[in-house]
Image (tube, rainbow, N blue to C red):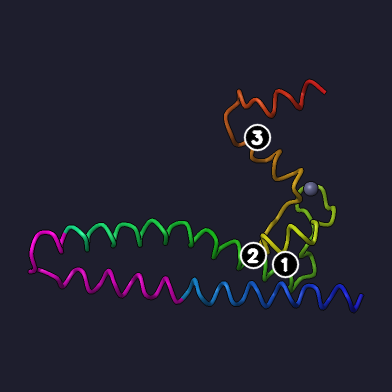
Amino acid sequence: MTKKESKHSQQKKILLARRQSLMEKLVHNKETADDMSDLTRGDDLDQAVATRDREMNYMLTNRERLELKAIEAALERIENGTYGKCEECGEEIEQKRLEILPFARYCRDCQTEIENRSGRKENPAELKKWRY
Ligand SMILES: [Zn+2]
């Protein structure tokens, strides 16, 4: 039990640190966007680069927002004691997987299945699975 708790507190530390850096990035992106709107001069090349950079920031932000959401959910699960359990089958998620993906909600098998399910119907992996 004690061992398990310390395992999760380690994940919690990782999640909190990750959340922190994402938050900082989000704030930074927002500030960058605000700065950009004030930019009305400068030569065309600078403008083009600035626009591209800004778009990249937004792209990252969208992705990171999803991650942030997943991190929040994982932290919640640590609080209510369901962290590290697959939401689909209830089995414990491999420690190794949690180290790579601290906000994983599903074990590897279920994740694969869910991805197949939400993917194209003609997913070869899914067809293969049905065959066995
Ligand atoms: Zn599972």
Spot occupied by residue 42 in the image (x, y as percentages of width and height)? 8, 68
What is the quadrant of residue 126 in the picture?
Answer: top right
Q: Residue at x 21, y 60 (%)?
A: 49
Find the residue positioned furthest to the top: 131
**Left or right: 23 as drawn, with respect to 87:** left
Q: Residue at x 35, y 70 (%)?
A: 29
Q: Residue at x 76, y 48 (%)?
A: 88
Amino acid type shown at disc 1: Arg
Secondary structure found at label 1: helix
Secondary structure found at label 2: helix
Q: Spatial distance from mark 1 to mark 2, Cα to Cα?
A: 6 Å
Mark 3, Cα crowd under 10 Å, few <14 / some 14-19 / many 20+, is few
Comparing 42 with 27, the one in front is: 42
Q: Is residue 2 above or below residue 117?
A: below
CB within 8 Å, label 1 to label 2: yes
Q: Is residue 77 above or below residue 55?
A: below
The residues colored magenta run 24-47
Q: Is residue 63 above or below residue 88?
A: below
Find the residue positioned furthest to the front: 45
Residue behind mark 2: 73
Comparing 122 with 87, the one in front is: 122
Spot occupied by residue 77 in the image (x, y as percentages of width and height)? 72, 67
Residue behind mark 3: 117
Q: Spatial distance from mark 1 to mark 3, Cα to Cα?
A: 24 Å
